[in-house]
Each structure stands twice: as structure tokens, then as C-alpha cells.
Amino acid sequence: MTPARSPQRLRLIRQIGVSLLLWGAAAAQAQAQVQTQQSAPQRAVPVLQESANAFDQLRAQAEAGHAEAQYLLGDQLQRGLGPLQDYAAAVQWFRLAADQGVSAAQSRLGQTYLQGLGVPRDPSLALHWLQRAAASGQAEPLFHLASLLEQGPEGIADPARAAQLYRRAADLGHLEAAVSLGVLYQNGSGVAQDPGRARQLYEAPAAAGHARAQNNLGLIYVRGAGVAQDYLRAAELFQAAADQGLVMALNNLGTLYENGFGVALDEARAEALYRQAADLGRGGATLISRTRPGAIYPAGVDYPQTTDAALAALQSRAQTGAPLAQFQLGWLILQPATVAEPALQRQAVQLLQAAAQAGQAEAMGNLALLYVEGRLLPQDYMLAYMWLVLAIAAGQPEAPALASSLAAQIPAAQIVEAQQRARTLVLQQP
């Protein structure tokens, strides 16, 4: 919780602001300047370990030609579990492992081409690699190939073959494949329409907590397709799926509340569900824009005290280059209750930059928010994503969700550029 606003605190912040401005003028050459929208930071910034020992060992095995290590290395780089998220590098390792016959790598490579993560989007290459992966007969590659054949563009789409592949994967216990096969039966796509068969396919995954199965089974009860119409049962199923964040279920549950079907009529509840669904439908895109600079603070770290003595001590530590003190001082200035003058707010940006350059994860996260806001720094989503990549690598727990939210708003090419710039900054460290 943010420290409470008080006249005493505001007075102290203004007092320290005068001293900060003097310090900032004297140390300007040592501080990173405010970054512009046209250029990335010129100094090497986060002091991060490029890799932990386990990652070093994995990379060594991959470079020695170990196929499984190549796949695992690509997986870590793509998901940001290694030192830095790097889609382009992940593709290279997936391809090496795929060429050695690792079906999981072939499947991931196919999905990468389908989504355009680190490579140009290419459904034909996606089909090539997913077919190679499915040749292993394993459930997961069968499912991904079936998904492409069900939803792919003209010339690739083949619902009948998709149904066959879903069936094979479902027989191997793949719940998602069973649900997808149920959808084909429900819609009569690639198979004869059969709501009863669809319900059978949904029931086991729904009982196991599968959100899409719960939602689809709920729709069957709403429509009375092969069963007695039961809005109450539908509401229970929609609620279970909505609790897992499924957009379709949130909208369907909203419809029930709006009309009083199976639940008490509640238009306010319906509107809230629709808003939540809209946000999630954009990939949670509003999370990043709703999170204000200064909102991120280290878990388990006490908020700085604002007595004269405590602020003087905090400033002294910040002047000696202590990253946490620099962050805390900048964070205090950015708090809405501080009502800092513009010059002091710019000083807060420099403090956050200095802390971020020293590897302080929360400073990185708040810098990203400043770039999204576009008030004290020029709005630049690419640089914002770069700082979030670095914050993720530094272990900031809120950064992955913020990065996912921002990724819903920017092109894949900007994400890749942000990842490349983040890696360049790390490699520039002495």
C-alpha cells in the first residue's frame, strides 16, 4: 500500500527536492540522460548475470550438439526463463533440435512459424514442421497439427483430417484434443453434426476443470441440444470457466446475468463481466496502460520512512550509488501524493535510470511504465518492452504480466527489436 499523504511528508519531499536538483546538476555526466523515442540508451544499463550456472551448462550441452538440450535452450529463450527472452535465438535452437528429430522442437518450430515469433509468419512452413512432429504419433504434436488443419488458411485447412487427428490425440488422453473434437461434432465441421457426441466428449474434460469444455458444455445446456434445457447448470459451468479467465465464458455468464437466466438478474454484474471479457480479449491489453509509474515496489521491502533523518540518510545512500536507495528516492517523488515539481519529476526519472543500470528490477519496471505513459519520457512501446524484458530477467514478478499486456498492442517485429536491444545492453557490460 502506498504511504499515506500528509503535509509533513510533502514538506520533506520538497526539501529533499532542492538538494536532489543540486546533486543532479553536479552528477549529470555520471547519470544516464532522458532517453528519446528515436534512440535506445547509449550506455550499457542493467548489471545482470547473462546466465546462471544451470543455463551455462545447458548452453554448453546445446553447443556440443545435444539435441534435447538444444530444444530446452530454445524453450527457455522463448519463454524468458533464461537470462533474457529472445525469440530469434529460440528459433535457431529449435531448428537445430528439429533437424535432429526432436518432435517437441519440430512442433514448437511449427507453432513459431504459425505465430511469427522471431521469424516471418509462414503457414506453409508451420504445416511442414507440424507434420514432421506429428509423425512421432505423440498426442501433443497430433493436436497442434489438427489445430492448424482445422483453422488454417485456404489450401491448408482440412477439417475432416483434423477430426481424425484430434480423435487419435484424444484416444491418447489429450483433453484439449477431446474438446476440439467435440467442437467439430457440435458444429458439424469435418464430421456429421452430433450434439450428443459433443456432450460426451466435453463431460470428462469439464469434470477435470477444463475451462473450454465447461463453457461448451454450458452452451449445450443453454440450447437444450440433446439434453433438457438447464440454465442453472449452464450458469455453474460458465462460472467455473469464467473463474479461469475464459473470455467466452465471461461473456456467456454476463448474458445470463443480464437476462436473469439461471441467476438473479443483475445488470451491473453483467456489465462488469463484459468489461473483463473485453480486456482479456485484447490479451489483457489494458493492464499496462492502467498501471501507473511508481506502482511497482519490491515485495518484502519496507517503504522508505519520510522523517527528516530518514530522508537525509536515503539521499546520502542514493548519492553514493546504492541502487535500492536511488530507486526508493525516485519512487517517492513519483507518488501522486508528493505533487513534485516537473524538474524534480525529471530527477526521479534519472534516479530510476541509475538504479536500472545497476540491475534494480523495480526501477526497470517503472521505467517501462514511464515509456508507456509518455509523460516524463517520450511514449515508446518498444523501449518499454525492452525494459520489461530486462525486468523479467532480473526476477521482477509483475513484469511478465505487464509484458504480455504490452505485447497485445505492438507488432511482433517491435518485440523482437526490444529483445535484441535488451541483449545488446547486457552484452555491453564490462
Image (spheres, rainbow, N blue to C red):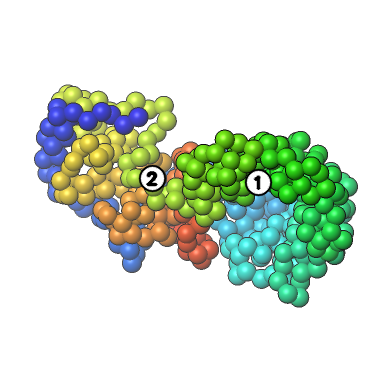
Viewer-closest of 323 and 253: 253
Query: Which residue sits at x=44%, y=47%?
Result: 287
In the displayed structure image, the side of residue 211 where residue 16 appears, left or right: left
Viewer-closest of 134 and 94: 134
In the displayed structure image, the side of residue 205 where residue 49 appears, left or right: left
In the displayed structure image, the side of residue 300 where residue 244 appears, left or right: right
Amino acid at circle 2: Thr
Residue 240, position in %: x, y?
A: 65, 37
Residue 34, position in %: x, y?
A: 26, 56
For mark 1, give the secondary structure: helix
Mark 1 — residue? Answer: 58
Identify whether 313 is placed above or below 429.
above
Amino acid at circle 1: Leu
Residue 291, position in %: x, y?
A: 38, 45
In the displayed structure image, the side of residue 137 where residue 411 appears, left or right: left
* Quarter the N terminus occupies: top left
Mark 2 — residue? Answer: 291
Please say whether residue 361 is visible from this viewpoint. yes
For discs 1 and 2, the disc positioned in front in the rendered view: 2
Query: Which residue sits at x=25%, y=40%?
Result: 336
